[in-house]
Image (cartoon, rainbow, N blue to C red):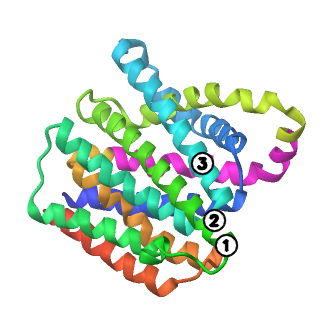
Amino acid sequence: MSFSALALLITAGFIHAGWNIVAKRAGGDARFALFTSLFLALVWTPLGLWLAWDVVPGWAWKEWAIILVSGILHVIYYVVLLRGYRKADLTVVYPLARGSGPLLSSMAALLFLGEQISALGVGGIAGVVLGVFLIAGGPKLFLAAKDAEQRRRVHIGIFYGLLTGAFIACYTVVDGYAVKFMLMSPILIDYIGNFIRIAVLAPTYFHDRATAAQLWQKQWKYALIVGTISPISYVLVLYAVKLAPLSHVAPAREVSMLFAAIIGGHLLKEGDRTERLIGALFIALGVIALAVA
């Protein structure tokens, strides 16, 4: 992996961890996802129009099909993630999602996109997955907690974390194929795909306007932050995919866990910092292995 790709992933990881903290604090649902998508469309309109003006009119059905599939996958991913945040700890849902997603993405890239990986690269992926597992709680995740309510939250967190990871893998492979093989703009994939997300999520607002209006008053500041910065992290990842194999980029982007382990545990006071820092070390070693593989 080139230094440029690694620098993109480190920057993306910091931003990604940051907006997930904000989303956790918002405690939103699908309507919050709609609010963030609306702000994304508004804030990034100048850049989106400038890049789309000469490119989008030349798109054929294949490009539009990729945009449609990508947009729907991103919607499902985000709604499932937000639901997990409402029902469980971020430091269970987020690590499992970020760990299982890249593992599945790498497997798909090796099986379906014709990529190859060295033994050192396999070791790097293993280090990332192990580190994520430790940050999520390690073996204690599968042990019965003394408190029944906490045990229930952990089990719910495991379920939503793994489900979110599956959708991360799906949209990562679809978007990775688009930028690597169809040579589509990473920015346009995210920006145009966002309008698909708005169309899918819009009914959640009109279903109960009174409640949606109340949520808007409470959550619009959080939505503005997430809608403004979240596309930056993902677009940087897609640019990294153009420079390095997807099987390397997908797990290496979990450098975000280095930041989430510290920031999330400190700000949200979810405990077990020592084990999470050890997990972060494994992630760091895994990312280094992927960088030099």
Q: Please tell me which residue is depicted at 38% across the width and 83% down the height of the picture.
A: 278
Please tell me whether residue 228 belongs to the stretch shown in magenta.
yes
> Residue 268, position in %: x, y?
65, 74
Q: Which numbered circle lies on residue 152?
A: 2
- The single residue placed furthest to the right in the displayed view is 210
Taken as a whole, is the magenta stretch helix, strand or loop? helix
Left or right: 120 as drawn, with respect to 70: left
Comparing labels 2 and 3, the label whose residue is closer to the camera: 2
Question: Disc 3 designates what residue?
Answer: 228
Q: Quadrant of residue 195?
A: top right
Whole-number angstrom distance, CA of label 2 to CA of label 3: 34 Å
Q: Secondary structure at mark 2?
A: helix
Q: Secondary structure at mark 3?
A: helix
Asked if disc 2 and disc 1 are in contact, CB closer than 8 Å, the reply is yes
Closer to the camera in the image, 60 or 289: 289
Q: Amino acid at mark 1?
A: Ala
Asked if disc 1 and disc 3 are in contact, CB closer than 8 Å, the reply is no
Magenta stretch, residue numbers: 213-238
Please tell me whether residue 219 belongs to the stretch shown in magenta.
yes
Mark found first going from the N terminus, 2 or 3: 2
Residue 54 visible in the displayed image: no
| Residue 144 to residue 200: above or below | below
Q: Amino acid at mark 3?
A: Thr
Neighbour class for label 2 at 10 Å: few (<14), some, many (≥20)?
A: some
Mark found first going from the N terminus, 1 or 3: 1
Closer to the camera in the image, 216 or 86: 86
> Residue 206, position in %: x, y?
80, 27
Q: Amino acid at mark 2?
A: Arg
